[in-house]
Every structure is written in structure tokens, then in C-alpha cells.
Amino acid sequence: MTAPQIIELLQLQPLPGEGGFYRQLYKAAGTIPASVLPQHGGPRSYGTAIYYFVTPESFSALHRLPQDEVFHFYLGDPVEMLQITDEGGARKLLIGPDLLAGQRPQVIAPGNLWQGTRLLPGGKFALLGCTVCPGFEFDDFEMKSREELIRIFPQHADLILGFTHGVS
């Protein structure tokens, strides 16, 4: 299968700002009231789930959400995730099927840290799933420019360059 075939078969759309392609598959009918979620500024569904698809040209740029996000590997080539905490700690995780190579089929991105995901060099595409509880709303999504992230985390400038869009 090719990337365009998968995008068509799964009816994926470009994900604005972040990059990659997605389609929401599930949004819980029940909601958590805003009074329980002050960091969200409104009620949220119990949870949401999407397909998420990356190619060499379209990857997940560094961003953050207030809630945890669970990534599931489904198909294609392995990806690497960069996570940066507000305190400046950074780590890379490998998402994929090769357990002996240190890859994991499921990875957690804790809330309130900067995260980005891209294919490992030479990869053609990866199909992932993302589950978020409480459910995702675009109002929760936070992104900063490449320049701003480098200003905040100068010790990770080289990493940030590979996980952001734009020119520097």
C-alpha cells in the first residue's frame, strides 16, 4: 500500500497546524463538566480516538495538550517521538513493532509536555492511533513557533529543528 492509498481508504484529512493526517473515529457521548476540568475552560467528552498518519513530508510538530495522550502503532514504519518537559528534560521514544530494537507499540505522552512525532530516517509512512482522555478539543491544543521553542529550550535547539515546521 502507498501513503495516498491509505489516506484515501481511511478518509484522512490534513491536521491543521500540527501536520500529518487524521480522522476522528470516536468521541464519547458522555461529558465531564467544566467545574471538574478548570485547565480546559469548558466541558469535555470522556474520551476521543483518532487515526493519525505521518509521512516524511508531513509529521507531528511539537505541541502540547493539557491531558495525557496514548499513541498506538498500527502499520508502516517506526516513528520517533520527542518529549520535552517544562523543566527542560528531553527524551526520545520509538513507536513501532520491533520490540528488540527498543520500539514499543504503545507510548504515553503525558499532559503538559511538548511532544512531536516523525518517521525514522528512510521511513515511508506510519499509521498510528491516538486516544485522549478527557476528550480532545482544538481549544486544548497549544503550539509555539520554532524560534519561541528554541528560545525557551536553547539546550535542545538541534532536536527542536527536526520536530518543527518553518525555516531557521
Image (tube, rainbow, N blue to C red):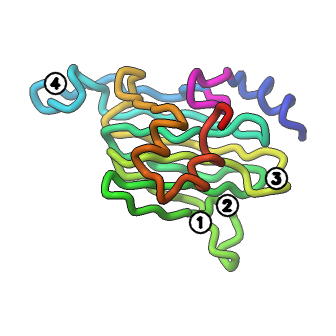
Marks 4 and 1, the one that precedes in the sequence: 4
Residue depicted at 56% across the width and 48% down the height: 160
Q: Main secondary structure of the magenta part?
A: loop
Disc 3 to disc 4, how far (Cα)?
A: 42 Å
Q: Which secondary structure lies at badge 2?
A: loop
- Residue at the spot of label 3: 123
Q: Looking at the image, is mark 2 or mark 3 nearer the viewer?
A: 3
- Residue at the spot of label 4: 33
Marks 3 and 4, the one that precedes in the sequence: 4
Q: Looking at the image, is mark 3 or mark 4 nearer the viewer?
A: 3
Marks 2 and 1, the one that precedes in the sequence: 2
Indicate yes or no whether the magenta region holds residue 21: yes
Marks 2 and 3, the one that precedes in the sequence: 2
Disc 3 to disc 1, how far (Cα)?
A: 16 Å
Q: Are marks 2 and 1 in contact (CB under 8 Å)?
A: yes
Disc 4 to disc 2, how far (Cα)?
A: 36 Å
User: Which amino acid type corresponds to the residue marked 4 in the rendered image?
Assistant: Pro
Residue depicted at 46% across the width and 62% down the height: 90
Outermost residue, bottom direction?
A: 100
Which numbered disc covers residue 104?
Answer: 1
Marks 4 and 2, the one that precedes in the sequence: 4
Q: Are marks 3 and 1 in contact (CB under 8 Å)?
A: no
Q: Position of residue 151 (x, y in %)?
A: 44, 43
- Residue at the spot of label 2: 96
Q: Tell me where the magenta segment starts and ends, as one range.
A: 13-22
Res. 139 image quadrant: top left
Q: Position of residue 104 (x, y in %)?
A: 59, 66
- Mark 1 Cα shell of 10 Å, populated few (<14), some (14-19), many (≥20): some
In the image, 162: left or right of 140? right
Q: Position of residue 125 (x, y in %)?
A: 78, 44
Q: Are marks 4 and 2 in contact (CB under 8 Å)?
A: no
